[in-house]
Amino acid sequence: MPTQELKLILPDGTTDAALHTPDPDQPQPGILLLPDVAGPRPVLDQVARDLAAQEYTVLLPNPFYRTGEPPLFHLPRKPGDPATAQRVAELLAPLTPDAIDRDIAAWLDFLTLHPSVAPGPVAVVGFCIGGLMAFRAAAVRPAKVAVAVSFHGGRLYQAEDPNSAHRNLPKITARLYFGHAVEDKSMPSEAIAALDQALQDWGGHYETEVYPGAHHGWTLADNPTYNQPQAERAFAKLTSILKETFPVR
């Protein structure tokens, strides 16, 4: 699949990004693919290529451009390791809700206007912090997002935070999907239950499920918590959602 390496000018700076397009390169539905805290890397490039092979145009940006360019980790990522935790904190620190929303708006504006993207709203797919970004994206540009998909998204429901993503639900018209880990400190069971109630009260098109045996980060093959059977199930679900969202091409 053809890939273009890009430098995108955003309100807060310039970020690196990759645009993966189908072959032959004809306008196709767009996907904004948002990485976990480890950022763009070969495993996410492969996800983007796989989606492009299904005839989608995929934009994979670096949400952590304020801190650095990939590779963002120069040491093994180990849950509970102090060095890993310190690096994660460094990467997440600049990502305030307002900063995230500014970035998302710029990425969506770029993607929806690109000649390789078919007219109409796009999909937003995210992992970990990218899952939170996908949820926020549906409210940042409601008319430009047809579906938002979050896998092991963290901090999706924060009861005491006035900027919590769930508070944006009244703005959202997109279909929403949340695939949760069975054990996730960033999205514990009580937060999942509270989000489910908020989604029910919202009344839009949504689906939420917990993946048995899956821990935070289970979908991506280079994560220590990778769970192949549940990852395959998650990506099969993603394929199904995308086909349902963009049925006629």
Image (tube, rainbow, N blue to C red):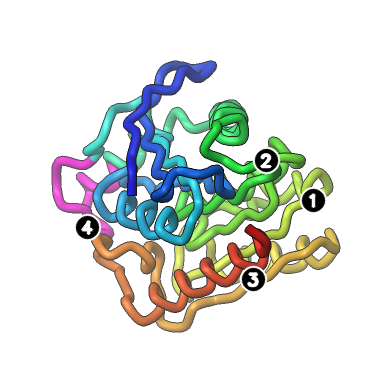
Mark 1 vs 2, N-terminal side: 2
Magenta stretch? 73-86
User: What is the crowding at mark 3: few (fewer than 14 residues within 10 Å), some, or many (at least 20)?
Assistant: some
The amino acid marked with disc number 3 is Thr
Mark number, residue 106? none
Mark 1 to mark 2: distance in Å? 18 Å
Secondary structure beneath dot 4 equals loop
Q: Position of residue 156 (x, y in %)?
A: 60, 53
The residue beneath circle 2 is: 119
Binning the other alpha carbons within 10 Å of mark 2 as few (below 14), some (14 to 19) or many (20 upward) gives some
Position of residue 214 measured from the top left corner of the image (x, y, whole percent):
41, 76
Q: Is residue 106 magenta?
A: no
**What residue do we see at 39% from left, 50% from top?**
23
Nearer the N terminus, badge 4 or badge 1? 4
Q: Earlier in the sequence, mark 3 or mark 1?
A: 1
Between tags 1 and 2, which lies in front?
2
Q: In the rendered structure, which amino acid carries the disc numbered 1?
A: Thr
Relative depth, front residue between 92 and 83: 92
Spot the residue most to the left.
Answer: 75
